[in-house]
Every structure is written in C-alpha cells, then in structure tokens.
Image (cartoon, helix red, strand yellow):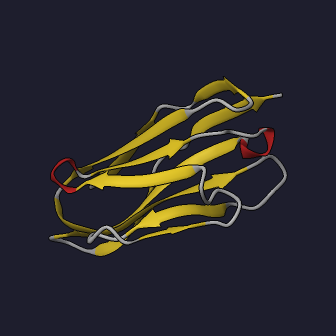
Amino acid sequence: QVQLVESGGGLVQEGGSLRLSCAASGSIANINTMGWYRQAPGKQREPVARISSGGATNYADSVKDRFSISRDNAKNTVYLQMNTLKPEDTAVYYCNAFVVTIFRRGEYWGQGTQVTVSS
C-alpha cells in the first residue's frame, strides 16, 4: 500500500507564492518519476511539472519560469514552488509518482489540494 499526501494549497492573491509538498509512504522500494498535475473546473487534468529520480525536470509551457519542482529522495517527497501566481493557475493540484514496491510497480495519485488565486 502506497499513499501520497499533499499539503500547502490555499488561497493567495495574484502575484503571490505557494509551496506544495507531497510525501509518499508505504512499502516503497524505489520511486521513479514524481510530478504534479492540475485540474481546473470544467477542464481536463493536465501535467504541470515532473522530476526524475536523477533530478531532470520538465515543465508545462504555461508555468515555465514561474514554478520550480524539486524532490528529497531520502524523504520520498516532491515539492512545487509556485511564484507569480495567476488566476488561471487556480485548480486542484494532484501529486503523481511512479512507485516500485515489493508487490508491484505502478502509478499512484494523491487526493489533491486546492489552489485558488484571486485577482
């Protein structure tokens, strides 16, 4: 059993910053790629950023130069630093990880954390 628990969402004014965290727990042997997705009301879930176990990163064009993803492998935790937030960043943000356990390897999702940016 693997759980991903997000924290750090909330309400912020346009131009502000938030830092999301996602901690993975359970019978984890290894975590490969970790990332963040988001889903705004009435829209499909979309990728925001991802980071490999070696630290290589990839960002959606809409968040480049504003968001930064990082991870602490010792803590099985991934972070998303979000700066210069815009109203269009408002969404539920989901943590995602490809996890290897002694039983299986596969994709896991967190429960989501709401980020609301007011104008």
Q: Is residue 59 above or below residue 73?
A: below
40 or 109: nearer the viewer: 40
- Residue 42 image position (x, y, % from top left): 84, 52
Q: Residue at x 26, y 74 (%)?
A: 104
Vertical side of 29 occupied by 71: above or below: above
Q: Locate residue 11, reporting x and y percent.
A: 66, 24
Is residue 52 rendered to the left or right of residue 75? Answer: right
Which residue is painted at 81% across and 57% down in the image? Answer: 43
Q: Is residue 98 left or right of residue 100?
A: right
Most foreground residue, 13 or 39? 13
Give the residue displayed 80% in from the left and 46% down from the top. Answer: 41
Q: Quadrant of residue 113?
A: top right
Numbered-mark total: 0
Image quadrant occupied by the C terminus: top right
Residue 103 x %, y %:
20, 72
Image location (x, y in percent) of residue 14: 74, 30
Tell me what residue is drawn at x 26 percent, y 55 percent.
1
The residue furthest bottom is 105
Q: Quick one: 105 or 8, which is closer to the camera?
A: 8
